[in-house]
Image (cartoon, rainbow, N blue to C red):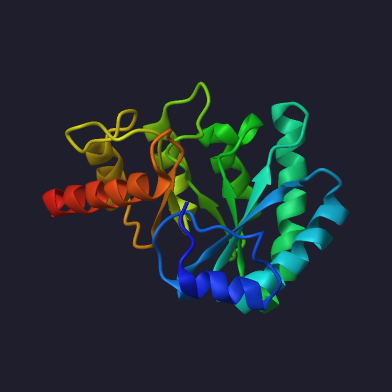
Amino acid sequence: SVIFPEIAQAAATNGLASKVRAPGPCLPSKFLLEVETAYLPAGILSSAAYLARWGEFAKSLGCHSIRVDCRSKGNRAEVKKQAIDGLHQLCEILEPMKVNAIVENHGNWSSRGDWVKEVMSLVKRGNCGTLPDFGNFRDYDKYQGVKDMLPWAKAICAKVHEINSDGEAAHTDFARMLKILKQGGFKGFIGIEFEGAADPVSGVLKTKELIEKTLRKLG
């Protein structure tokens, strides 16, 4: 991931230089703060209270959202119930700050698009949304997963591990994926997360070129 100078300076000013990262090129005013350490709902009350401080950090940095995980242990129904409860509490805390809580497909049941869709359908809060990640679906079709999560998406994470010599992503059909976003009416920012073995800055920039090229073709 790439941290831009404006974001780095804002993070340093707020004592967060080692705690934030940008999921790809984006404007500082629309920056997404990723909370790597907090999983909802492992101790729902304490988790919601802990994440409240990240809402303040996000607001001071000019972020529109914080990303949270919903991947505690338990069966499908148990984790769904806990996630709904935790997200309600968190979003109530974040609402006066005008900050969103967005759920990424990031392990356990959250790596299934249909499960995230069920959670979102029951939370029903304006500042609760999703962050569909192209690369984090497990035993679930990634294209269907993005479709499942798209109605609530407040940002997109275009995860890439390798760019081929022809400029295309090795593991994701970007023409198909971006067509899904376009047909679904998504108008927000697409963050870029490069996790390959190559130079990360080069990987991000090549992925940016791929996205721009593909969007031009889609019209």
**Which quadrant of the structure image shows residue 20?**
bottom right
Provide residue 112's location: percent of width, then percent of height.
55, 31
Q: Is residue 65 above or below residue 171?
A: below
Quadrant including the C terminus: bottom left
**Which quadrant of the structure image shows residue 177?**
top left
- The residue drawn where x is 43% and y is 52% is 156
Provide residue 148's location: percent of width, then percent of height.
45, 40
Q: Is residue 133 above or below residue 76?
A: below
Q: Is residue 157 visible?
A: yes
- The residue drawn where x is 12% and y is 49% is 217
- The residue drawn where x is 20% and y is 32% is 165
Of residues 60 and 49, the one drawn nearer to the viewer in this rendering: 60
Residue at the far top in the pictured view: 139
Q: Is residue 110 left or right of residue 173?
A: right
Residue at the far front in the pictured view: 199
Provide residue 16's location: percent of width, then percent of height.
68, 67
Q: Is residue 186 left or right of residue 110?
A: left
Q: Is residue 92 visible?
A: no
Q: Is residue 136 left or right of residue 170?
A: right
- The residue drawn where x is 69% and y is 29% is 76
Of residues 75 and 46, the one drawn nearer to the viewer in this rendering: 46
Q: Is residue 151 above or below residue 163?
A: below
Q: How many marks?
A: 0
Q: Is residue 151 left or right of residue 114?
A: left
Of residues 183 and 124, the one drawn nearer to the viewer in this rendering: 183
Provide residue 11's location: percent of width, then percent of height.
62, 71
